[in-house]
Each structure stands twice: as structure tokens, then as C-alpha cells.
């Protein structure tokens, strides 16, 4: 298959290498396809790899991959030509990240609040810690899964409160990951939705998330 | 420790059982603490378990657990008395779910759009599939993790496009979960943020999500 990749960053090149490795022809599109990192990628990847403008890559691809930084995405799509994407499968690898407030980034679109933040506003003097919201009640205590234990992600403003909750979670036999302040509820409540949608798709609530590491 | 649980549903009772099992005293708070399911839970859980009003449970707990349905959460907090939560650790287990449009639910607060939906609006004739957005570029192709393969979650409007992307992901050696239409990007882009925040906390990008099952 001919694959057109919009975006020549680490993500675009990594996916391009993957597609080439399994036998596809890949053209990476960029504002500046002559830049060194792209020429190196083409040379290393071999005869099935090439580079060109966004429009070149979009026209080339039978399947397209959108792998741009969010701030450049609208422009890349305009340059690629929406007509070059019509009817084609387009894999959207982008994340709408806003770095304007420093690191870590925030989501630039659509995510403005969460239940956890609302609860903390309702109870300004309580030390709210979001936890246990990403799994069904049957598996909250001592979850038993092949390959487990699963991971519980928590967030909240108060470090001591999170230490207390972490100890409790360990006694409930969870691995624990602290993702930061209560704003993290914007990310953990959607994670509950992923759990729920898998339940909806399979009819089974016997699943839980694990963060694989190495 | 004395634990006060606001909410007597499956979640509140499951967590109450867990806390009692590891030696804590638990009082479950409810609008109607005399209902059968609560009396049965108290009888089964033993001498360290009790029930009462939301205010009773909030006053009793040295640590509080908020385990209400979202639609009843504001009212439960009002009945519990915010002063009863002041300075205390409160574990927020709620998810702000809106069931008004049927099953599956949507997030009731804060989540109104996503990059994936924006991309689909920019390219109305393309068959957009969100994929590869929840892992760093180093692990997009043939991810190698103890306990793997990790899971890629995808979403999009076009079933055939998702089949094509699923086949590609399998050839990239990912397990694949389809969570539904492109609105699912509202859940997968926050999942990327969980990945990013773990990176920010640990300095390592060598992690990926797996959905444990049994």
C-alpha cells in the first residue's frame, strides 16, 4: 500500500519506518522536505521511502497519517489539500497540546473542567484526591488479573493526602501512579469512559488498566 | 481509621467492604440508610460497619470517600455538610456521567470537543481514525514490553477504515480496542495526557497502556 505521512517529526518518521519495514511505500510530507533529518530518513529507510510537500504526500498516499504538532495541523491540512484526503483512511495521531502555560502541556481543545475540580470547588477545605474512578466496583478491592496488579492513577492538590491514599491503594493491592494536581481529573474521567466504552463493546466489566514499563 | 463513605451504591459498598477487610471502621452515608441493601451490607460486613445519613458519615469519617452518582453529587455534598469535610482527605470516586442521550454515557462536564473531531471537521470526506496517539514515538512500531503487547485504542466513524487500521496495528504488533465513533477522541487525547504526565513525573518515556482482562 502507498502511505502518505503528513509531518516529519519523530512520530512521522517512526511510523514511516514501521510502514516501510512491513513492506509499504511511504512518502513523508513536510513544509521543507529537503531538511537533513528527512534526507537521512529517506536514505536509511530505502527505495520504498521518499519525501515531498504536504500535497505530494497527501496525493501519494492511499492511506494517510496525520502526525503534525497540533499548532501546525490546520495549516498542514490546508497545504495538503483536503481533496487529496477525500474517501481515504486518515490515521489521526495528533494530540491537541497547548504548551503556552509551560510543561507539562494541556489539552488545547474541548477540555475545560472535570468532576474532580468541581468537587474540590464544592469542598474547598477538603483535600480531594481522585482515585478508584477508572475501574468497576467488582475490582476495586484486591483486583485479580493475569499480568496484574493493574495501575490506579490518582491526582489531587495535597501531597500528604495523596500519600495517605497511596498507602490505602497499596493495601487494596493496586499499583499507584500520581499524575499531579486535581486538574488531572480531566484526564482520569475520560479514562473511565474508555473503561465504560470497552464494557459497552464487550458486555464484560472484567478489565483494568496497567501501565507497562521497562 | 474511621472511614465515611458518601453513597451506598455498588461502588460505596465495594469500597466499604475493602476498608473493613483491612481493619478500618466504615460508616456508609445515604439519603435512606434504612434500605435493605444497606442493612444487608452492615450485617455482612460486621461490627466495624455502620450506616447513617450523609452528615453522619461525613462527621464520622477521618477520611471520606465520595461515591455518589454524578446527578446526586451536589446534593449529597450539601447534605453531608462541607464543614464536615474540612481538612479531611476525601477520595473522589465519582465520574461526571450524563446518561441523558442514552447508553453509553457522556462526560457531563468540561469535555466538549477534541482534536480528532476537529480533524474530521477539517476533512469531512476523509475517513479519520484516531490511533497511535497514546504512546511515544519510540514504541509505536513493534512495542516491546514485559507483559505486553500493550493495547492501542482507536475510534472513528467508518467501520471499514477501522478494520484497515486494525490490520495495520496488528502488523505493528499492537493489541487493538475500538472504542466507537470519533467522539472517542475526547477520551483518547486525555489518555495521551496521562502518558505525558507519567513521562513528566518519571523522566522516562518507556511505558505503554495495557488493558488487563480475564
Image (cartoon, coloured by chain):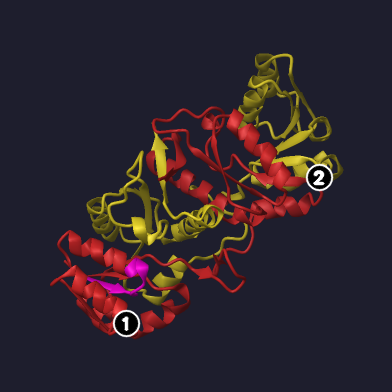
Chain colours: A yellow, B red
| Residues beneath discs 1 and 2 located on the same chain | no
Q: Give the extent of the magenta segment.
A: B2-12
Residue found farthest to the left: B47
Q: Position of residue A68 (x, y in %)?
A: 67, 40
Residue B137 in sight in this render: yes
Residue at the spot 29% in from the left edge and 72% down from the top edge:
B5
Indicate left or right for B150 with B188 as reference: left
Disc 1: which residue = B80
The residue sitting at 21% across, 74% down in the picture is B42
Secondary structure, mark 1, is helix
Q: Give x and y (percent) for residue A21.
A: 64, 20
Mark 1 or mark 2, whichever is nearer to me: 1
Disc 1/disc 2 C-alpha distance (Å): 54 Å
The residue at which mark 2 appears reads as: A78
**Chain letter for mark 1:** B
Parent chain of label 2: A
Residue furthest out toward the right:
A83
The structure residue drawn at horizontal position 84% and vertical position 42%, both measured from the top left corner, is: A81
Amino acid at each position: 500500500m502507498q502511505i502518505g505521512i503528513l509531518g516529519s517529526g519523530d512520530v512521522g518518521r517512526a511510523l514511516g519506518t514501521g510502514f516501510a519495514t512491513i513492506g509499504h511505500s511511504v512518502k513523508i510530507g513536510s513544509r521543507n522536505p529537503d531538511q537533513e533529518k528527512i534526507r537521512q530518513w529517506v536514505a536509511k529507510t530505502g527505495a520504498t521511502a521518499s519525501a515531498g510537500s504536504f500535497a505530494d504526500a497527501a496525493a501519494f498516499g492511499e492511506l494517510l497519517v496525520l502526525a503534525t504538532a497540533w499548532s501546525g495541523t490546520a495549516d498542514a491540512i490546508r497545504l495538503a489539500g483536503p481533496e487529496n484526503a477525500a474517501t481515504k483512511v486518515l490515521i489521526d495521531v495528533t494530540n491537541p497540546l497547548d504548551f503556552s502555560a509551560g510543561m507539562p502541556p494541556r489539552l488545547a481543545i474541548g477540555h475545560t473542567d472535570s468532576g474532580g475540580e468541581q468537587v474540590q470547588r464544592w469542598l474547598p477545605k477538603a483535600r480531594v484526591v481522585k482515585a478508584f474512578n477508572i475501574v468497576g466496583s467488582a475490582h476495586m478491592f484486591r483486583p485479580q488479573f493475569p499480568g496484574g496488579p493493574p495501575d490506579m492513577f490518582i491526582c489531587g492538590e495535597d501531597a500528604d493526602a495523596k500519600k495517605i491514599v497511596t498507602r490505602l491503594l497499596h493495601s487494596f493491592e493496586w499499583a499507584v501512579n500520581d499524575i499531579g494536581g486535581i486538574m488531572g481529573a480531566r484526564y482520569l474521567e475520560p479514562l473511565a469512559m474508555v473503561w465504560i466504552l470497552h464494557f459497552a463493546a464487550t458486555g464484560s466489566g472484567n478489565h483494568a488498566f496497567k501501565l507497562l514499563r521497562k
